[in-house]
Image (cartoon, grey):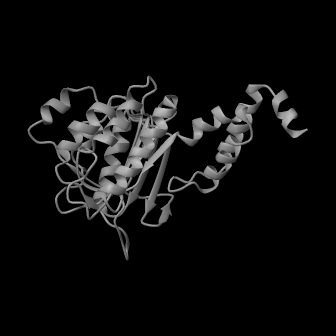
Amino acid sequence: MMASTIIQLSQEIIDAIVDFVTHNSARNRNGLGPLGRDILNCSLVSRSFYHRSQFYIFEVVHVREESSDKLRTRRLLAIRKIMRNNPRISCFVQEIVLECSFFQRAWWVADDSLFLEFVQSIAGNGRPLRKLQLFGNYKSDEGYGVVHIPNFERLLVHFFRPFIIPSITTLVLEYLDNIQVEVITECVNLVNLELSQVGLVKPEGNATMISTRKPPTLRRLATRFAEPRSSTKPVDWLHRYIDFSQLEMYKVCIDDLADIQYAQQIINAAKGSLRELVLFYRKAVCKFSPWIFF
């Protein structure tokens, strides 16, 4: 009776059921978690549930740092096999989450042909990527540590510019150092930017080229800046290369006076478009700061 009842439901109702299950499940990016279990169960109900469930199962691809190149290659080969058996899966991928390790001497993303083949298949499917989350996964007794990425120029040329920069609307960078600011300023469709414990490299010889390019126009911004040894806080220069005139939401973590000065510059650049401001002081939420003016 249950099977016959499901068959009689219209596809629109079935799609709405799958959407409801997804939107009311807790999203867990680090594993299947509650969302993964619910969606996998939906995909097994019947063929009519399968297609809509696939959309959510493959919406986010999380690529973790592996303990060896052989293990990473084996998992990438498995992904390639899945996508070759069902090419439409590439159309479902909207977000890539990438981890990089503190112990990695030369990061693998720009040189791994299997991974670049996977990203290229997504970028060329007519439904381009919308979000990239890139974060360091080095853990210490005090929490996460900032990961230095050597030779970021190679990553910019072989990964970001051909596959990421042309399409993404959301960029999340966390616990990273030596990140060239071009990875942000060249994303012309970017509207949502999150920076947490990120050391950005100030433009030098190419600063003129950046300033003449159409800047991204942000609507949502969240920042908490670290101060790694090799980089400086972008208090005095980041706002020159990003258009904040349409910024609607700004979330900022205040760790010291430099962060307050930076927040004031962003607020000034918003020119009255700001609708929501959230201030954090370390782990406590500040509802008001006497140093910030509107």
Vertical arrangement, residue 5 with respect to residue 279, above or below: above
Judged left or right of residue 241, residue 251 is right
Quadrant where the image shows the C terminus: top left
Q: Nearer the viewer, residue 187 or 56?
A: 56
Q: Residue furthest left?
A: 205
Vertical arrangement, residue 284 with respect to residue 75, above or below: below
Residue 68 falls in which quadrant of the image?
bottom left
At horizontal 38% and vertical 25% (from top left) the residue drawn is: 124
At horizontal 42% and vertical 29% (from top left) the residue drawn is: 128
Judged left or right of residue 185, residue 46 is right
Residue 167 falls in which quadrant of the image?
top left
User: Residue 146: horizontal and vertical position, in percent?
Assistant: 29, 62
At horizontal 87% and vertical 33% (from top left) the residue drawn is: 4
Residue 232 falls in which quadrant of the image?
bottom left
User: Residue 150: horizontal and vertical position, in percent?
Assistant: 18, 54
User: Residue 137: horizontal and vertical position, in percent?
Assistant: 36, 61
User: Residue 121: horizontal and vertical position, in percent?
Assistant: 39, 31
Q: Nearer the viewer, residue 203 or 269?
A: 203
Q: Nearer the viewer, residue 253 or 91?
A: 91
Q: Residue furthest right?
A: 1
Vertical arrangement, residue 60 with respect to residue 64, above or below: above
Tell me, yes or no, if residue 197 can be seen here.
Answer: no
Tell me, yes or no, if residue 256 can be seen here.
Answer: yes
Q: Residue furthest bottom?
A: 141
Quadrant where the image shows the N terminus: top right
Judged left or right of residue 124, residue 20 is right
